[in-house]
Amino acid sequence: MARPYRFLATSQAVAAACFLTFGAIPASAQTSACNDSIAVLPSPLAPWKGAPLRVVFAAEQASQGEIALIAPNGQVAASSRERRGGPPYFWLAEVPSPAPGKWQARLTRDDGPAECRTVTREIAVAATQPPRPSGSKTSVWPIRNSWNRETENLYSAWIEKLFEAPLDASPSWPALHVVLRDPARNVLHNHLGLREDSINLYIRPDCADLPYFLRAYFAFKMGLPYGYAKCTRGGGGKPPRCPVWWNIEKEEPRPEAPEDIVAAEDAQASGASQQKPTGGLFDIFKQQQAAAPKPNAPGSSATQRTAAARPTPGFAVPPSASAPATKPAAPVRPPRPTSLALGFGHYLQYSVADGVHSGAGRTRAADEGSDFYTVPLTEDNLRPGTVYADPYGHLLIIAKRVPQTGGNAGVFLAVDAQPDGTVSRKRFWRGNFLFAQDPALGDPGFKRFRPIVRDKNGALRRLTVAEISKNPNYGDFSLEQTKLSVEDFYDKMDDVMSPNPLDPLRAMKEAITSLEEQVKARVISVENGRKYQLSGKGDASMPDGAAIFETTGAWEDFATPSRDLRLLIAMDVVRNFPDRVARRPERYAMPRDKDVAQVKAELQAVLAQELSARKFSYPRTDGSQWTLSLKDVIDRVTDLEMAYNVNDCVELRWGAKEGSEEFATCRKRAPQAQRAKMTDYRPWFSERRRPPRT
């Protein structure tokens, strides 16, 4: 099958040992004969004997091979035949304490023409620490690289390694900085030689921030251009729009809601004036800024006011009925530190986190103002780093593709962040990746970041979809997903993950495993809510209407309406799996000696056994553990439609019956007014639908 990516061929032939002696910039070792692209990344940026030397080779085509790091004395100091990924495919080797001198990083592949089998990179390791890179007044970080297929492949390799774990594991981290500080995971750990991953920035993105934070981190380390769009959230039957774009060379001067910009444009077009609503700031770092003094307080000039503590990132504060008629002065950002590392942290906190939200992922596929573009549903295009935007505002990032082998189904693994700051990995399936077609919601689906380039006039800009389609490094824009029904989308993804027919029994067990992972992830979320109750901070305020899914503060951090809606859908998928096999028997390797009805009956029997056998425990109000089975969860599906309120005891949140032994430790209930609202909103959960934004 022809690859969708095309590459520019170099003009010179490459010998059997290709010496790539460019600085720290990944470059291609491709020739027209090789028809491949090899990216080479040594880390740190300026290697020296006092820092571990890591080298990554990333390739577009699949092949077996060996990476070797050869010391100045000619001996092989490290080697590995472990090939990860696909596509792209990559090899990784590390030397903890490299000797000073000229090293060679070599990738030797087993197949292909002789002139293409070996790629070598010379790496100079200094005896003393080289000068450290410095910051810039004109850019958040200096640009020394460009986005192309090589840097995109390295980005994919970095993402996959960062969240690597066994397939049967369900890894979770309390915050993103925990992952980034781990040198065993982060190939770019302290890449700039500034100890930039050791200065204790506490980075806690929500689901909307996570793709932008990961892209920004990689761009910062690699010296790549970066920017973000300010987008509306949509509403009133209209999808999100992105009226303005900022980047590291043109920083946003002050927080401004994109709705204000759109309203001003509309008002100008109609010749009217319009009052702008106030906006809110966000809180992603543990290091808090001092609260801003009151406008009338002594010494509270506009230049003295600092950004106040802000709600958890991801969603704007709903306007208050008692809000003042006049708009207060916009918060003033503190100056960006001149230090390169601290300047990056400042940029994440005051620009990116304040500027992005989940609406950015739901823009229309052909909207040129978007940071993303939609891609075809193929294994070549759904690479690590690809973003999935669901129609209701949740974002995930593909972290790994596991191909179908033998009787095992193919799997896409993705990571996401939650409002409480946790980052976790999960499988692609209907319970985690919601899909719907509604123009008012925008276009959901798999998307990639638009590459940012420098224009002829020297300014940074994003490529248009037409340019992406024609660009030899990309060429992967597609409107395919916008034309699929819900069932067609999931059927297509089944075909992409597992091109060959699946054993129906094995496929069902995979679905049960995915549900089990989702239930265990909910244990963590509900436990965080229990800890919030123990903090003595009082009841969390419950928003009205659709805002229960999009709000700020303790409700967003610890209530679980969005997660529970996805869980209810996941439970339906598992319960109805035998019916799905009966509906689409051609998708499965059906036994020759059994008809569809017999296979369905067998699946129903195994389903009951598996649900009863798979168990988990959760901490009750008093901290004691209570064990449930997946069957218990399925049996409580109706109760779980009313189990998302953080102000209820955890026993209620797991559907325990009043008067039961399990319920005996319950000590708290949500206020009656909140329970009444939950009753009103119950149809959204019982019908498995999320209300549109008004």
Image: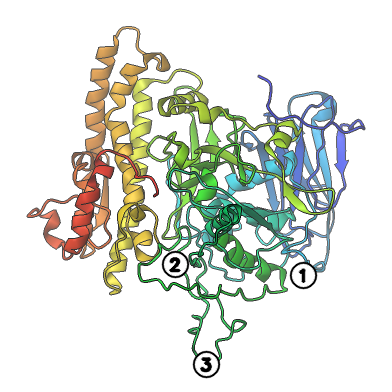
Farthest residue toward the bottom?
A: 298
Q: Nearer the viewer, residue 376 or 501?
A: 376
- Left or right position of 416 against 614: right
Q: Real-space Cα distance between discs 1 and 3? A: 32 Å
Quarter of the image with the N terminus is: top right
Which residue shows up at 57% across the image and 37% down it?
Answer: 365
The residue under label 1 is which amino acid type?
Lys
Label annotation for residue 298: 3
Residue denoted by label 1: 137
How is colour applied across the structure in the image?
rainbow
- Left or right position of 341 against 623: right
Residue denoted by label 2: 311
Q: Secondary structure at mark 3?
A: loop
The residue under label 3 is which amino acid type?
Pro
Residue 496 pos. (x, y %): 52, 26
Farthest residue toward the right?
A: 12
Q: Are marks 2 and 1 in contact (CB under 8 Å)?
A: no
Give the mark nearer the N terminus: 1 vs 3: 1
Q: Nearer the viewer, residue 355 or 296?
A: 296
Q: Is residue 32 above or below residue 221?
A: above
Residue 341 pos. (x, y %): 68, 68
The residue under label 2 is which amino acid type?
Pro
Q: Nearer the viewer, mark 2 or mark 3?
A: 3
Q: Secondary structure at mark 2?
A: loop
Q: Residues within 10 Å of mark 2 (few under 14, many from 20)?
A: many
Q: Residues within 10 Å of mark 1 (few under 14, many from 20)?
A: few
